[in-house]
Image (spheres, rainbow, N blue to C red):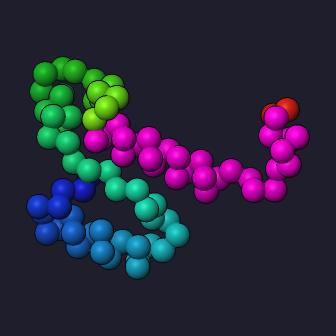
Amino acid sequence: MYDSSLSVSREILKDAPEQYKKLVFNTIIHRDIHISKEPTFRKSTMLPVATSQLATDYMNLAKEILGKTTSPTLSKTEEEHG
């Protein structure tokens, strides 16, 4: 998870795309201190508040993954009929 206050996070953000090229997504998952504390309180970390920055980050990542794996060759008719 990315934390702009940590120099190591900034270094990874800078170096990862150069080193791993197409294996790195553009979406940044920001660190959420509240989620980091969840296991301490025996709460699930898989159920973040839907309006949180973390939930938004993961939704953006899912959209990015789907965009990279969706076949651009499907016709409109094929998409409608699945």
Location of residue 70 in the rendering, given as x and y in whole percent from the top left corner = 68, 50
Any magenta on residue 11?
no
Tell me: residue 6, above or below residue 61. below
Name the image quarter holding residue 53.
top left
Instruction: Give the residue at x 44% y 47%.
Output: 60
Instruction: Give the residue at x 21% y 69%.
Output: 10
Q: Is residue 6 left or right of residue 46?
A: left
Instruction: Give the residue at x 35% y 37%.
Output: 55
Location of residue 11 in the rendering, given as x and y in whole percent from the top left corner = 23, 73
Name the image quarter holding residue 45.
top left
Q: Main secondary structure of the magenta part?
A: helix
Q: Which residues are magenta?
A: 53-80
Tell me: residue 10, above or below residue 50. below
Query: Disc count in the image?
Result: 0
Which residue reaches farthest bottom?
A: 18
Instruction: Give the residue at x 21% y 64%.
Output: 9
Tell me: residue 42, above or below residue 54. above
Q: Is residue 50 left or right of residue 37?
A: right
Any magenta on residue 63?
yes
Name the image quarter holding residue 40.
top left
Location of residue 22 in the rendering, given as x and y in whole percent from the top left corner = 52, 69
Q: Quadrant of the C terminus?
A: top right
